[in-house]
Image (cartoon, rainbow, N blue to C red):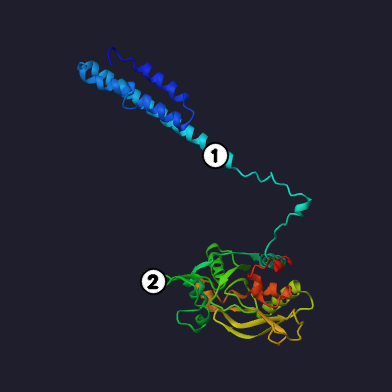
Amino acid sequence: MSGPVDVDALVAEARVAIAAADTTEDFRHVAAVVSGKKSALVEASRALGSMDPDARKELGRQLHEARATVDGLLEARRTAIRYAELSAEMAASRLDLTEYVPGEAAGPVARGHLHLVSQTRDALEDVFVGMGFEVAEGPEIESDWYNFGALNIPPAHPARGMWDTFYLHLGEPESTLLRTHTSPVQIHLMERAVLDGTLPIHSVMPGRCYRRDTPDARHLAVFHQIEGLVVDRGITFADLAGTIETFTAAYFGPDIHSRLRPAYFPFTEPSAEFEVTCTICKGEGCRTCSQTGWIELGGCGMVDPAVFASVGIDADEWTGFAFGFGIDRCAQMRHQIADMRALIENDIRFLRQF
């Protein structure tokens, strides 16, 4: 290159050429012309060696600024072209969901609905909200403390035999597992109430649980449970029994009743299991109820003082009761489903009934 170099003109020419590039192929060609090894800017930089120091310094500064400007223009144009081409590709491959309109020959469009278990959970929540309870939820992955320790089930306790289940981390500093019941939510609620000073508590806790049960007509390894907790002054076992009977009549109908029989749970004292009249045989006895006429729905009892102690509640001032039962079992009883395994088989013929 001979003669003076007009750096501004080179930049202006490059700007026009870059703006004119519309495709990736055009851009590659323009980039080689304005900034490649044979571009005017590169040739001008090579000529600096033959210039006197003062002129070389000034022109070098101008060429450096020009190169930075051209590189910025190239990057901006590259991005714009790529965005435009991606947009065009997406528009070309876009699926128009409004294009297909089924005609009479295609028949009516089938609409989905909530699974029976989800419907049952919603109905249970409505019943308990109507009875004055609030709905609370918690995580499905819990620590050993919340799932066992705070509920008066220390390590090696015999009650763990049927509940030690799907561990995610076993060992120090803390084991974690898929919760075996929604009782840990009760611990979270009581801890929060103590910290916030929001006692009393009247809550139900629905959710998914996990146990190593062998599936049969009344049991599933992954099931849904709803528990209730009341903590207040002057609560007695009579309040618990009345709550269970009120719920049974409200949910299953006035012809279905509940009964309590003594049981043992580490987190309640005294404890009971509550059963309801078998809705399939109406108390006559069948395969589902093992010919007894009653179906065990869940467990209940007065909150053990040891549980209150674990969350910092004064058992001399506060008393309470807790209960829990399977949502899947409620669905089975209310809709007279002989085998609970039908709930998880995904047979569309069965699901369409609900």
Dot 2 alpha-carbon crowd within 10 angstroms: few under 14, some 14 to 19, many 20 or more: few
Tag 2: amino acid: Glu
Residue shown at 79% from the left, 76% from the top:
254
Q: Secondary structure at mark 2?
A: loop
Secondary structure type for disc 1: helix
- Lateral position of residue 88 relative to residue 295, left or right: left
Q: In the rendered structure, which disc, 1 or 2, sits on the residue that comes first in sequence?
A: 1
Q: Quadrant of the C terminus?
A: bottom right
Label at residue 89: 1
Looking at the image, which is closer to me, 79 or 249?
Answer: 79
In the rendered image, residue 104, in percent from the top left (x then y), is placed at: 79, 51
Q: Which residue is mark 2?
A: 172
Q: Measured along the vertical axis of the image, is residue 233 above or below residue 44? A: below
- 348 vs 243: above or below: above
Q: Nearer the viewer, residue 235 or 215?
A: 215
- Nearer the observer, 162 or 71: 71
Q: Residues within 10 Å of mark 1 (few under 14, many from 20)?
A: few
How far apart are the two marked residues, 1 and 2, measured between alpha carbons?
A: 53 Å
**As drawn, which residue projects farthest toward the front?**
105
Q: Position of residue 172 (x, y in %)?
A: 39, 71
Q: Does residue 77 sit above or below 104 in this rendering?
A: above
Disc number lying in front (1 or 2):
1
**Rendered location of residue 126, percent (x, y):** 71, 65
The label number, if any, that marks residue 24 in the structure image: none
> Hey, what amino acid is under mark 1?
Glu
Viewport quadrant of the N terminus: top left
Vertical side of 85 occupied by 252: above or below = below
Residue 132 in sight here: no
